[in-house]
Amino acid sequence: MRCALCLALLVAAARAAAPATAANLHPVLAERLALAPADSLFSVIALLEEQAPVAALSRELAAGGADRAAQHRAVIESLRETAARTQAPLLAWLATERAAGRIAGYTPHWIANLVVVAAPPAGIAALAARGEVSFVESNFRAEPQERNAPAAAPLPSIGVTTGIRAIGADRVWRELGITGEGALVAVLDTGADALHPALAARWRGLFAPASECWLDLLGVSPVLPVDPMNHGTHVLGTIAGCAPGDSIGVAPEALWIATNAIGQGVGSAFDNDVIAAFAWLADPDGDPDTLDDVPDLVMSAWGVNEVLGYADCDSRWWTVIDHCEAAGVVCLFAAGGDGPAPGSIRSPADRASTALSSFAIGAVDASDPADWPYPLTSFSSRGPSGCAAPPELRIKPELVAPGVGVISSIAGGGYAVWSGTAAAGAHAAGVVALMRSANPELGVEAIKQILLATARDEGPAGDDNGYGRGCVDAFAAVQQALAGGPTAAPVDPAAPGLLAVRPNPFRPRGGELALSFALGAPAWVELGVFDVAGRRVRRLAAGELPAGEHTARWDGRDERGRPAAAGVYLCRLHAGAASRALRIVLLR
């Protein structure tokens, strides 16, 4: 939605002047390449055709009762094997091209089967034309969702913060005896101050190799975590900070690790720090057989720098995040500080693929814990999501938590009072640490379901585009974690299993897109393809279907039989009262 006018003008000019380009270039990237000087450099993400079957593997493991260690091992091994087996020819070609000066550089990744490449327009076109490459799109830049300045006034004695009391975390400590011991938390932010009195004693690097406890992507301090921007240190303090007399963290006995992936540029870069960070977080020591190094959660307070080529519902890192969660890491996102306008939430927090992704946290003012219900802050980004999805999935954020006047640590050993959805998300992240401390085998989806099921509804009745489901309730969430999982709720027996499409991206020439799903009971089913504005392009099914597995096919044409334009579409399935949605990329 942002920069729509400038983007539209560029697109129109490029379409008039652009020569034919490789069919699997993102349309916006193709137009940018057509307008660029021949010697300019572009940083792109090249997605390979074959991807590891992580979703199917995860379902199989869950059905077989695999524990978290077994799930982690199987997922990481599958991801690494797929990348190693399929990337070799492409990497050999890239090495030759770099030696010849036709590309500037490249970095392969395994967390999703992709390679980040920097090259001039001719090099990008040659890359996109290779058979093993399914899609090429622009690289992206991540930045902190909010920028804060430390409070100028001296701070009072801290004690237990108002935010901790507002969500009931102090009750968890007192009444349940759970303080985060055994949990490991991570921040994907601007770094962390490992010498801060509230954090120093629980950095995992005190007894484990530093390489699996701190990922310095910016090259500022390779061994000891640092944070020149303060943001990550403040977030981490709210999750797990504690010092004598200062109880600032929701899970004060949790250990922590960190990476400084936020604030990097891309330009002509041939890597992507956010992708590298999620790969590291999924397996910090590089050994799939170990789990003690893998964080229980990662708190992200970054958003996309929405310059040309980025848009609402940008999906280029979704697979990376999904694979990190499949490895057992709960990924939480700050909703952002762009409110109060409707639809102000931005990527990646605006994702609306399912009810659990992306799991975004907005901010309420809980300065007085007794003043319930807590008012929603003006700055907290609102839904609905700009993604093409059923209305119930577009509601954002998922939850809210205290985000006004939050006292926490900053680099250099001090404390500051900040406000923002990063601080709110940190409260929710601390609750996840308490839940994993209470029940280490609790799965990622179960944790999110519990958070939603136990939230206190504080806005209009039901889910809404300000409060989401409501405010995080630490005590209720940990109680349910101790009980073994989400409270059973009535389930629609016709609810469809995971919707899968293949191939994706899809090129109609010589084939069709197969859309597969399973029904647990007979149901009236509607299945269709929609554009990003939510307009139906093609109805694929409408009628009663029996229980079992089903497959529909799309030939890339609209209702009138005309070829649909290249771009991003949404496959939407309704069965009974349940819905599923999945992104499709159509190539020409």
Image: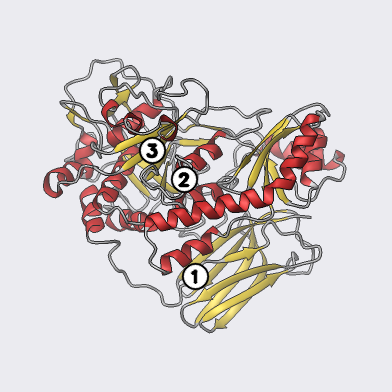
Circles 3 and 2: CB atoms closer than 8 Å: no
Q: Where is residue 480 in the image (x, y as percent from the top left)?
A: 24, 58
Position of residue 565 in the picture relative to residue 397 (left or right): right
Which residue is the site of mark 1?
A: 497
User: Under tag 1, what secondary structure?
Assistant: loop
Place of residue 16 in the rendered image (x, y in percent of width and height, measured from the top left):
85, 41
Whichever of labels 1 and 2 marks the residue nearer the N terminus, that label is 2
Q: What is the x, y in percent for residue 67?
A: 37, 60
Which residue is pictured at 86% across the width and 45% down the height? 20
- Amino acid tagged 3: Ala
Q: Where is residue 188 in the image (x, y as percent from the top left)?
A: 44, 35
Residue 376 at least partly seen:
no
Q: Mark 3 points at which residue?
A: 186
Res. 268 image quadrant: top right
Looking at the rendered structure, the number of numbered marks drawn on it comes to: 3
Q: Residue at the location (75% across, 66% down)?
A: 557
Q: From the viewer's perspective, is the residue at label 3 or at label 1 nearer?
A: 3
Label 2: how many residues lie within 10 Å, few (<14), some (14-19) or many (20+)? Answer: few
- Few, some or many residues within 10 Å of mark 1 (<14, 14–19, 20+): some
**Split into 4 quadrants, where in the image is the N terminus?**
top right
Measuring 81% from the left and 33% from the top, which residue is drawn there?
35
Sequence-wise first label, 3 or 1: 3
448 or 287, which lies in front? 287
164 w.r.t. 581: above or below: above
Mark 3 and mark 2: Cα distance apart in space? 18 Å
Specify which label sits upstream in the sequence, 3 or 2: 3
Q: Give the quadrant of residue 298.
A: top left
Question: Residue 287 shows which numbered tag?
Answer: 2
Q: In this view, does 120 lie to the left or right of 305?
A: right
Q: Which of 121 and 36 is in front in this view?
A: 121
Which is nearer the eye, 156 or 368? 156
Disc 1 + disc 2, Cβ < 8 Å:
no
